[in-house]
Image (cartoon, rainbow, N blue to C red):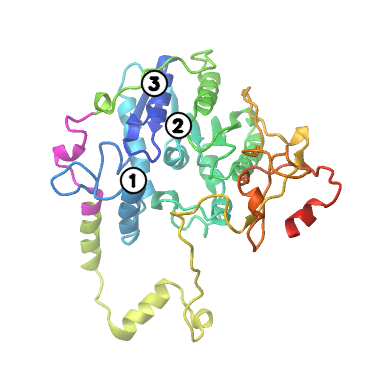
């Protein structure tokens, strides 16, 4: 049977999260062998346990990843590489199973699992197909949207080397890959489409244009049933193992049923933690370098950060003050909406999906001649008209627009009024 490595996004309970055990179980029920693993800092692999408990001192997932990843960055390590090694070692185990066909090995995951899928799939030639979900976009879109990312989602020197998400998937070309995205995701779907177009050109040059696909779901961030079914269809087309196009009935198991340990944490086995290994490396590095003080330390910092005299002048380096995101809600105070009547050709669609897709239909009718149209917000420096705030929604896809007829004001006049 075909085998699939499943990797998880940022769920507290790792592989036991509903969406993640759903895709693993769904694959198993239609004829695959799926081995799904907990990432570092999630599920049964917490790294920073509070004293005398089995609970994390930090928020599992994001916070544990940032703690581990930032410490590693100081010693020249990249947490994403450790995640990739987990995936490769998981594959080593999967291929020991006699029921697994080594000629048909897939990899899939959502969000943080989409990150892992993107990094891993081109690192090991034993993978034959991949379905990264809710991650692949472009670094530019992430920067423009001020999208925060964990340390393992930011490969060192990637921007300096001119690399983007699509370049990591290109390492797998021309093997089959489907980019799975969501219309309303904070991983900007416009970047997903841009990545797909770049890869489509590469796959065409390699004579396999059919091996790269893009599915855009109609939902928010997450491995929704619609997107899981897109993954099933794609893998089935590649392997021929099943003709199933919809998800079979599932039984969502309790976390304890899926535990590999008796307590729910591998700490019972007394393993080394990532931070302890990082600390060991830091001590080894410290022993090999002189202890700098005074002007020598200043010069070393300038050299490391490439702070030249020309760049510095006589003042501090240029910097930004970033607003906190924890309390940010939409609509943002500095945004004003502009509503459009969409032409039929502008509505996005997904291959193999029958779900109707609309570009952000308003939550409720807004006043004026544009009251039935989806919204495309534009930014300005003042707050929007208060009467618009109940229906404003942020953008997610580029659209071909036709302005509705207005008896009094143009759309631009409405924005600027």
Sequence-first disc among 2 and 1: 1
Residue 118 inside the magenta-drawn segment: no
Residue at 39% in and 34% down: 7
Residue at 52% in and 19% down: 236
Outermost residue, top side? 243
> Which numbered mark, 3 or 2, is in the foreground of this view?
3
Q: From the viewer's side, name the closer residue of 90 and 380.
A: 380
Does 247 appear above or below 294?
A: above
Residue on which disc 1 sits: 82
Residue 268 inside the magenta-drawn segment: yes
Residue on which disc 3 sits: 25
Q: Is residue 110 left or right of residue 83?
A: right
Residue at 19% in and 41% down: 54
Figure quadrant of residue 253: top left
Q: Tag 2, which secondary structure?
A: strand
Q: Which residues are magenta?
A: 260-276
> Which numbered mark, 2 or 1, is in the foreground of this view?
2
Q: Is residue 135 left or right of residue 275?
A: right
């Amino acid at each position: 049977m075909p085998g699939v490595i499943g990797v998880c996004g940022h769920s507290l309970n790792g592989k036991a999260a509903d969406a993640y055990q759903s895709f693993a179980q769904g694959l198993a029920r239609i004829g695959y062998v799926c081995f799904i693993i907990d990432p570092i800092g999630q599920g049964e692999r917490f790294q920073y346990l509070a004293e005398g408990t089995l609970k994390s001192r930090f928020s599992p997932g994001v916070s544990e990843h940032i703690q581990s990843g930032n410490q590693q960055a100081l010693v020249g390590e990249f947490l994403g590489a450790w995640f990739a090694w987990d995936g490769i070692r998981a594959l080593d185990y999967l291929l020991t199973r006699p029921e697994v066909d080594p000629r048909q090995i897939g990899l899939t995951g959502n969000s943080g699992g989409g990150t892992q899928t993107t990094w891993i799939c081109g690192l090991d030639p034993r993978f034959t197909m991949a379905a990264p979900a809710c991650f692949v976009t472009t670094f530019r879109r992430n920067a423009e949207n001020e999208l925060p990312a964990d340390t393992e989602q930011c490969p060192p020197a990637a921007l300096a080397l001119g690399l983007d998400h699509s370049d990591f998937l290109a390492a797998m070309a021309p093997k089959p890959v489907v980019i799975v995205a969501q219309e309303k995701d904070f991983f900007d779907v416009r970047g997903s489409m841009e990545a797909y177009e770049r890869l489509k050109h590469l796959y065409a040059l390699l004579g396999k244009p059919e091996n790269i696909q893009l599915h855009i779901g109609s939902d928010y961030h997450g491995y929704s049933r619609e997107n899981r079914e897109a993954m099933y269809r794609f893998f089935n087309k590649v392997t021929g193992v099943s003709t199933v196009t919809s998800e079979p009935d599932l039984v969502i198991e309790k976390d304890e049923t899926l535990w590999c340990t008796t307590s729910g944490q591998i700490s019972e086995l007394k393993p080394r933690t990532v931070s302890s290994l990082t600390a060991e490396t830091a001590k080894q590095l410290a022993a090999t370098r002189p202890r700098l003080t005074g002007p020598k330390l200043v010069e070393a910092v300038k050299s490391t950060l490439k702070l030249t005299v020309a760049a510095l002048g006589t003042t501090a380096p240029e910097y930004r003050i970033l607003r906190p995101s924890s309390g940010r809600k939409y609509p943002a105070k500095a945004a004003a909406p502009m509503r459009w009547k969409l032409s039929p050709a502008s509505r996005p669609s997904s291959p193999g999906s029958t779900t109707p897709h609309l570009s952000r239909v308003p939550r409720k009718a807004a006043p004026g001649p544009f009251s039935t149209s989806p919204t495309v917000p534009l930014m300005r420096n003042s707050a929007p008209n208060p009467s618009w705030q109940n229906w404003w929604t942020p953008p997610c896809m580029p659209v071909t627009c036709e302005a509705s007829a207005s008896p009094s004001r143009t759309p631009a006049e409405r924005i600027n009024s």
